[in-house]
Amino acid sequence: MTGGDGQRGRTGRLVGIGAVSGVVGGLLGGGNGVLTVPALAHDTSLSRPAVHGTSTLAATPVCVAGALVYWLAGGTIDLTAGAGMIVGGMVGGVWGARLVARASDTVLRVLLIAILALTAAKLYLDAAGLDPADGAAVVPAPLLATPWFVVPAGLVVGVVVGAWAGAMGLGGGLLAVPALVLLFGVDLHTAAGTSLLVFAPNSLVGGLAHRRQGTADLRIATLVGLAAVPGAVGGAFLALALGNAVVGLVFGTFALVMAVREVALLVRHRRAPARAPG
């Protein structure tokens, strides 16, 4: 294979990563980084922090395209909770970018595995009708009726989720969607649309912060992000066509598969140094 053929092959793989991750992001309300992070780690020579930073920046087009579909086709966006989360997410995204530059590879993998496993468990419980809250929000209904509580609460949630998303490069959906469902009592479709809206500016701010500190590759992020747009549109329309229970099962299964994969990679990574001397 010539150098040109090799470059075209790498470009084709990156386009493929973007296309598939776009479908995941549009269908699940973000969180497409659960695919782009391991895929970029496997198919590029980027350092682990740069993988997370590049994934963060590449998530921006997915969030914009997906949020537009949810808004125009289904009207499933909670602007009251989303307003505070947008501001908090941008602030948290900058902190997350700084955090990932100092975190070890093992810490990043363990955090990813934990959130994937917890998300899968919750969604499976919901689908089986075993949700302890029986679908109700944790926050009392009278508080949810006033923006004077919901917007500041969204701000706090946005900071936490934004910092995590900025560090992990996962687009925020794996945390934002369960948080919106559990804390604010919205349905899964509304949570997905709101999550995409919230993390459009978060991904951009966090990604640019990564770029400034050298933990993001602009060329790869642009290629993957633009390739993801058609998939994000298709994934969002598919989510709107499916029931909440089906979307929850899809989300939970995907999260569980990715958690198992990351556990296997973590075990392999930790065993590798012990085998190296031999």
Image (spheres, rainbow, N blue to C red):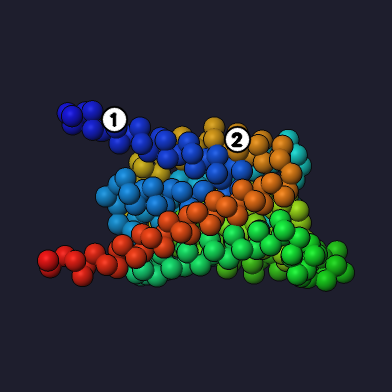
Q: Residue at x 83, y 71 (%)?
A: 140
Q: Is residue 89 visible?
A: no
Identify the amino acid type marked 2: Val
Q: Residue 146's x, y, as percent?
A: 84, 65
Query: Where does the N terminus fall, quadrant-wise?
Result: top left
Q: Residue 44's x, y, as percent?
A: 30, 47
The image quarter in which residue 107 lies? bottom left
Q: Residue 59's x, y, as percent?
A: 50, 47
Q: Is residue 272 visible?
A: yes
Residue assigned mark 1:
8
Identify the amino acid type marked 1: Arg
Categorize mark 1 by other alpha carbons within 10 Å: few (<14), some (14-19), many (20+). Answer: few
Residue assigned mark 2:
233
Q: Residue at x 76, y 56 (%)?
A: 186
Label 2, secondary structure: give it: helix
Residue 143 horizontal side relative to residue 264, left or right? right
Residue 126 horizontal side relative to residue 212, left or right? right
Q: Residue at x 48, y 36 (%)?
A: 19
Relative to 232, is 252 above or below? below
Q: Residue at x 60, y 51 (%)?
A: 251
The dot on residue 93 is none
The image quarter in which residue 62 lies? top right
Categorize mark 2 by other alpha carbons within 10 Å: few (<14), some (14-19), many (20+). Answer: many
